[in-house]
Image: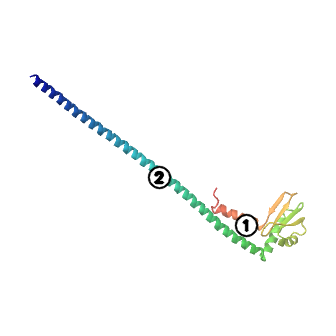
Amino acid sequence: MAADALTKFSSAVLNEAGERQKELIRQLEQEKKQRLAQKEKELARRKQKAISSGMEKLKHDTAFSVARHRADLKKNLYLSRDKIAEGVFREVEENVRAFVGGAEYETYLRRLAEEESELFVQGETVCTARKEDLERLKSLLAGKNVVFEETSEDIIGGFVLKNVSAKLYADCTLRMRLEEQKQWFYENSGMIVG
């Protein structure tokens, strides 16, 4: 009997230990599944975060690259337009120089001298011009109180009138007219960015 009771007791303890072991294994398996699920969620979250971060960086880098490329294209466009405009104005300057060598220039110079000299009636006026135009201007402005000087600048043609006492100044050079046309062209062609 005592052996039987001991066997029953031992069997009950072993059964209980077995049940307890099964319960612990089940709990460990459950905890393992939960931890794995938690780690998988954490890994998925990190992966999504890395993907999102990578996508944001890619978007930023792409936007920056596109903006820089657009700026470079715009710069190249303005440089190209500037080269074209400079080429056009070089041709215009050549044509103006040809005009100065022609017969129509004498008429132009006479008309210009008549129009501008009427503004400089009081005091002494200084007329600065190219060496080639000084004799013509002396005859055109004869009888006026004008002092003539040769310019060292490349004014192409025309003249500059200065009257200090009347505080008047007139730049009637073809260089100035050409520069004014160039400025007008740049402003009205959209080539000046403001």
Q: Position of residue 173 (x, y in %)?
A: 78, 66
Secondary structure under the numbered disc 1 in the rendered image: helix
Report the disc number at residue 58.
2
| Outermost left residue | 1
Q: Is residue 29 above or below residue 57?
A: above
* Residue at position x 65%, y 62% in the image: 188
Q: Is residue 1 above or below residue 126?
A: above
Q: For residue 49, what is the image quadrant? A: top left
Secondary structure under the numbered disc 2 in the rendered image: helix
Nearer-the-camera pick, 173 or 54 = 54
Q: Position of residue 78 (x, y in %)?
A: 61, 62
Left or right, 117 with reference to 193: right
Q: Quadrant of the C terminus?
A: bottom right
Q: Is residue 100 visible in the rendered structure shown here?
A: yes
* Residue at position x 72%, y 63% in the image: 180
Q: According to the image, label 1 marks what residue?
A: 178
Q: Position of residue 50 (x, y in %)?
A: 42, 47
Nearer-the-camera pick, 119 or 32 = 32
* Residue at position x 13%, y 27% in the image: 7
CA separation, marks 2 and 1? 51 Å
Q: Is residue 38 above or below residue 110?
A: above
Q: Amino acid at mark 1?
A: Leu
Q: Is residue 119 visible in the rendered structure shown here?
A: no
Q: For residue 96, what is the image quadrant? A: bottom right
Left or right, 136 with reference to 32: right
Q: Position of residue 40 (x, y in %)?
A: 34, 43
Q: Amino acid at mark 2?
A: Leu
- Contact? badges 2 and 1 (CB < 8 Å): no
